[in-house]
């Protein structure tokens, strides 16, 4: 009996060992097979590509019609080419972006990375999509002298983003200019450092030319002193392993196709063209347009004002800020018409033809009224008007983010004077990464409202002057224009 049990035990032991070895073999085979899959095969298998980017004006942010940004639009098209969904991943700070890629936390980087020799040792760059230069920025003024060479900034307060290509360039320059010093800021991004220069807290900073193009309208007193580098290329970054070769080839094909069919040119124009063409309108030019253009649309503004309970001159001021009273105005971002409505907003308002002045003005007035109705009841008086106006420009979501920050900082979230001080924080990474809607060009709605208030004041002055029909005095009309609050 004992021998029989022993035999059965031995048989069962051999059986279980065989099963165990078989399972282990299958697991090993599966691991080997999976390891042999390329990154492109893995992307298609899971139906999703994960892309590392930054929450900035040149890369990715939440716009009026949803997610947008030059790099975002590019990777969205790339995901469509691959037939997969797009997943955006935002690192905690800039220094983490390449380690996260090489740590297999993402498939590629699309974050406006400058192609440098140091980075070539860490990643493989796809074909370049943009060429930029590094620019030294300074503030103009009567007592400010423009620096023209490296020697002029030695001993001055220069700050750049830590871990950036700017810092790499300064390290190179110090080989021939050993007295050159700077501060590598680990907490601020380029936009924040621009503000530091504008506020004269630092003397200089360095920024890529494409970023300065988008920001210069918010800092009219800032100028380019000189180029700190030769033209450099921006490109996506991929891992350098052999398993990423197929993904690189797909990216190579993608960029060839969008260059050949003009898509890349159109995207560059959409995101940068408007900023390149931007020129502030002087008061004298505005007054000339009041005489020449406004009469064509004045009755429409009056009618829209009566229907939606607005001062017609406020609507006219908004339209001028949007389009300079040009009915067929079209921006590179797709908004169009005298009130510059987005396609989605026009659809919601049943505006069939955005280039029809009557439809556009009525639609813009109605949209402004809807925005005012959506604001909390605690916002009253003129504060309600200015906040709705800011929402017209940047969106209700971003305005609400700014109101929350205002409350956190012990300000009054129902007062425009308090909220407008916090809106620019939405372009700062340490603030916008904690908000619901993320990055926004926070200074834009502040400038937007300020300009409209200025235009409104001039229109009120002009309208009252016209009604009174005073005698000509030969006085410069701009000298008695009231300033906006």
Image (cartoon, rainbow, N blue to C red):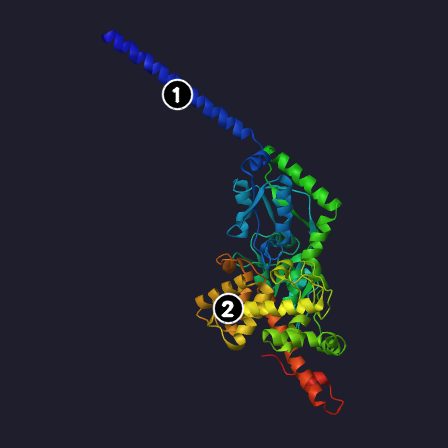
Residue 351, quarter of the rendered image = bottom right
Which is more N-terminal, label 1 or label 2?
1
Q: CA distance from mark 2 to mark 1?
A: 66 Å
Residue 138 percent across, percent down from the top left: 65, 66
Q: Is residue 113 above or below residue 320?
A: above
Frontmost residue, 254 versus 208: 254
Q: Position of residue 266 (x, y in %)?
A: 72, 52
How would you rate the neighbour count of disc 1 (Cα within 10 Å): few for under 14, some for 14-19, many for 20 or more? few
| Most foreground residue, 364 or 260 | 364
Residue displayed at 61% across by 74% down: 307
Q: Which residue is mark 2?
A: 375
Q: Nearer the viewer, residue 22 or 314?
A: 314
x then y, percent, for residue 30: 49, 26
Q: Label 1: which residue?
A: 20
| Quadrant placement of the C terminus | bottom right
> Where is residue 347 shown, x and y percent of the image?
63, 59
Residue at 54% of width from left, 64% of height from top?
A: 396
């Amino acid at each position: 009996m004992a021998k029989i049990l022993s035999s059965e035990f031995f048989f069962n032991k051999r059986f279980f060992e065989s099963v165990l070895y078989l399972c282990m073999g299958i697991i090993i085979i599966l691991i080997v097979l999976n390891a042999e899959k390329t990154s492109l095969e893995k992307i298609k298998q899971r139906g999703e590509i994960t892309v590392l980017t930054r929450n900035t004006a040149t890369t990715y942010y939440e716009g009026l019609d949803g997610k947008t940004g030059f790099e975002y639009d590019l990777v969205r098209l790339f995901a469509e080419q691959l037939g997969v969904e797009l997943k955006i991943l935002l690192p905690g700070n800039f220094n983490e972006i390449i380690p996260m890629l090489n740590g297999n936390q993402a498939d590629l980087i699309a974050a406006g990375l400058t192609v440098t020799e140091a980075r070539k040792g860490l990643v493989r760059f796809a074909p370049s999509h943009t060429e930029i230069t590094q620019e030294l920025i300074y503030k103009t003024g009567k007592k400010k002298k423009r620096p023209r060479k490296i020697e002029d900034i030695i001993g001055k307060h220069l700050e750049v983003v830590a871990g950036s290509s700017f810092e790499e360039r300064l390290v190179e320059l110090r080989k021939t200019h050993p007295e050159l010093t700077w501060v590598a800021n680990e907490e601020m991004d380029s936009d924040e450092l621009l503000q530091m220069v504008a506020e004269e807290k630092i003397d200089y900073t360095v920024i890529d030319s494409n970023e300065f193009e988008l920001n210069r309208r918010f800092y009219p007193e800032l100028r380019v002193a000189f180029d700190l580098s030769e033209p450099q290329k921006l490109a996506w970054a991929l891992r350098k392993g052999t398993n990423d070769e197929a993904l690189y080839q797909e990216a190579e094909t993608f960029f060839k196709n969008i260059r050949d069919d003009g898509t890349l040119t159109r995207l560059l124009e959409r995101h940068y063209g408007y900023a390149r063409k931007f020129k502030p309108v002087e008061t004298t030019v505005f007054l000339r347009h009041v005489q020449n253009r406004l009469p064509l649309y004045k009755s429409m503004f009056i009618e829209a004002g009566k229907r939606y309970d607005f001062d017609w001159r406020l609507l006219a001021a908004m339209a001028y800020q949007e389009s300079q009273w040009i009915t067929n105005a079209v921006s590179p971002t797709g908004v169009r018409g005298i009130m510059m409505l987005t396609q989605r907003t026009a659809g919601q308002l049943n505006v069939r033809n955005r280039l029809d002045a009557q439809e556009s003005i009525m639609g813009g007035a109605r949209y402004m009224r809807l925005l005012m109705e959506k604001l909390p009841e605690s916002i009253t008086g003129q504060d309600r008007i200015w906040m709705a106006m800011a929402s017209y420009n940047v969106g209700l979501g971003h305005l609400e983010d700014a109101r929350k920050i205002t409350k956190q900082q012990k300000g009054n979230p129902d007062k425009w004077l308090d909220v407008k001080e916090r809106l620019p924080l939405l372009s700062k990474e340490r603030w916008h990464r904690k908000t619901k809607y993320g990055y926004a060009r926070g200074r834009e709605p502040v400038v937007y409202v300020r300009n409209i208030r200025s235009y409104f004041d001039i229109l009120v002055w002009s309208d009252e002057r016209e009604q009174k029909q005073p005698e000509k005095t030969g006085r410069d009309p701009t000298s008695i224009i009231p300033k906006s609050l």
